[in-house]
Amino acid sequence: MDFQNRAGGKTGTGGVASAADAGVDRRERLRQLALETIDLQKDPYFMRNHIGTYECKLCLTLHNNEGSYLAHTQGKKHQSNLARRAAKEASEQPFLPAPQTAKVEHKKFVKIGRPGYKVTRERDPGTGQHALLFQIDYPEIADGVVPRHRLMSSFEQKIHPPDKRWQYLLFAAEPYETIAFKIPSREVDRSEKFWTMWNNDTKQFFLQAAFKIDRHEDSHQQNQQQYY
């Protein structure tokens, strides 16, 4: 665009362009840039009609050239219609079922009965604590299985009527049935006096549980020592 004869311009400098002329020049440069970077042939809404103008099939608008159409695609109307079309297609698309997570198959064992056991009552001569030593025999235990144990309150089990005086110590190891021992409902000493050991060679599981001395039992032992 030739601006050299504009008022206020110096010879050879190109002159001062008006706002309208600058706007036309800017739009032309943007159109050329858009044509170089955007392939209109891949636009599904771009169409050239029989009279040589261009149409937007999404917004049903007419445009004299490609630049006008490109400017339209950046406008609010076209962008809003694109958003509505995307939302409509998403709502009409059937929901696909969620992929199923891989299920972990639990190993099933045929129960072969109860294991053999031996319970020994013990007493620490130094502290006077009572303890129980359990020996459970698992000669036919499954490969890779280590016996497990846990304490259960009388109110948790469903076999006997609940009795707060007792609790249960359970032992489990496949393929044997789970066995339980009814022991006094006293606090177990969780120090080094509570220990477990699994002998993989002899297939025997050992557990020792010592009970803490309550105040009543402690005073009773003191009275016995004073008596003797």
Image (cartoon, rainbow, N blue to C red):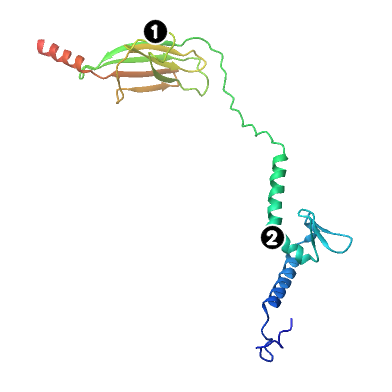
Residue found at x 26% / y 20% = 212
- Please report the residue visible at 71 percent of the width from the left and 44 percent of the height from the top: 88
Q: Residues within 10 Å of mark 2 (few under 14, many from 20)?
A: few
Q: Position of residue 143 (x, y in %)?
A: 52, 22
With respect to residue 2, does 40 lie above or below?
A: above
For the residues bearing labels 1 and 2, Cβ distance under 8 angstroms = no
Q: Nearer the viewer, residue 109 or 161?
A: 161
| Residue 74 found in image quarter | bottom right
- What is the x, y in percent for residue 127? 21, 19
Q: Mark 1 to mark 2: distance in Å?
A: 78 Å
**What residue type is disc 1 on?**
Pro
Where in the figure is residue 71, as x and y percent of width and height?
72, 64
SS at badge 1: loop
Residue 161 marker: 1
Tell me: 148 left or right of 18.
left
- Residue 71, disc: none
Which residue in the structure is indicated by mark 2?
75
Which quadrant would the C terminus be assigned to in this image?
A: top left
Q: Nearer the viewer, residue 196 or 47?
A: 47
Front-most of 7 and 194? Answer: 7
Q: Residue at x 59, y 24 (%)?
A: 105
- Exactly how many numbered labels are in the figure? 2
Identify which residue is drawn at 76% across, 54% down: 59
